[in-house]
Image (cartoon, rainbow, N blue to C red):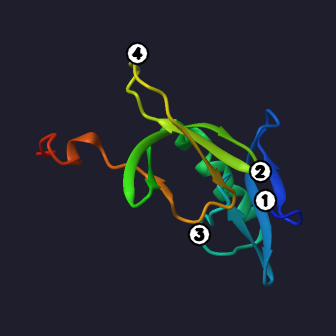
Amino acid sequence: MIPADWIPHRRADREVVGYLREAGDGFQAMDLFGRPLGEPADWLEAEEALEAHGLAWLSEPFLLDVDGRDVRVRVVEATPQRIRVKRDDFGDVRAEQAFWEVPVPETGRLRPAPPLTEWPGLGSAG
């Protein structure tokens, strides 16, 4: 769960894009997963980091460590309590669905997926 003393940062449409937490004499920008976006800075720089990071990254594929095996997933929900992901089915409506929940702050089980061309058996990027 996101700590109660972290300050939600909202973009103009009131959507939360991340959090600011006190860090020494400054503030650290934290993404929706509770991960730091750079080093502590002053309030304005931390806000700018959150604005620049935005929300588009949530639509990208991720790898989830499931019992020591990487599973390609997509985020379906991100709340201050949890991140809910589902196996990336590549749009196949007949595919078996599998969901997992990851606590927030996220501790490293979830990370950006490399391009598919870098996956074993799918060729190389060039």
Q: Earlier in the sequence, mark 2 or mark 3?
A: 3
The residue singled out by tag 2 in the image is 80
Report the mark closest to the observer, 2 or 4. 4
User: Looking at this rendering, what residue extends furthest in the bottom direction?
Assistant: 24
- Mark 3 closeness class: few <14, some 14–19, many ≥20 residues within 10 Å: few
Asked if disc 2 and disc 4 are in contact, CB closer than 8 Å, the reply is no
Mark before the other along the chain sequence, 4 or 3: 3
Disc 4 + disc 1, Cβ < 8 Å = no
Tag 1 near tag 3, CB within 8 Å: no
Q: State the separation of the CA atoms marked 1 and 3.
A: 18 Å
Q: Which residue is mark 1?
A: 2
Amino acid of disc 1: Ile
Q: Which of label 4 and label 3 is nearer to you?
A: 4
Q: Residues within 10 Å of mark 2 (few under 14, many from 20)?
A: some
Three-letter code for the amino acid on which mark 4 is drawn? Arg
Q: Nearer the viewer, residue 17 or 3?
A: 3
Q: Quadrant of residue 3?
A: bottom right
Q: What is the CA distance from the residue labelled 4 to the residue labelled 1?
A: 35 Å
Query: Is residue 61 visible to the viewer in this orientation of the structure?
Result: no
Could you say whether the residue bearing mark 3 is in a helix, strand or loop?
A: loop
Where is mark 3, residue-wise? 38
Q: Amino acid at mark 2?
A: Pro
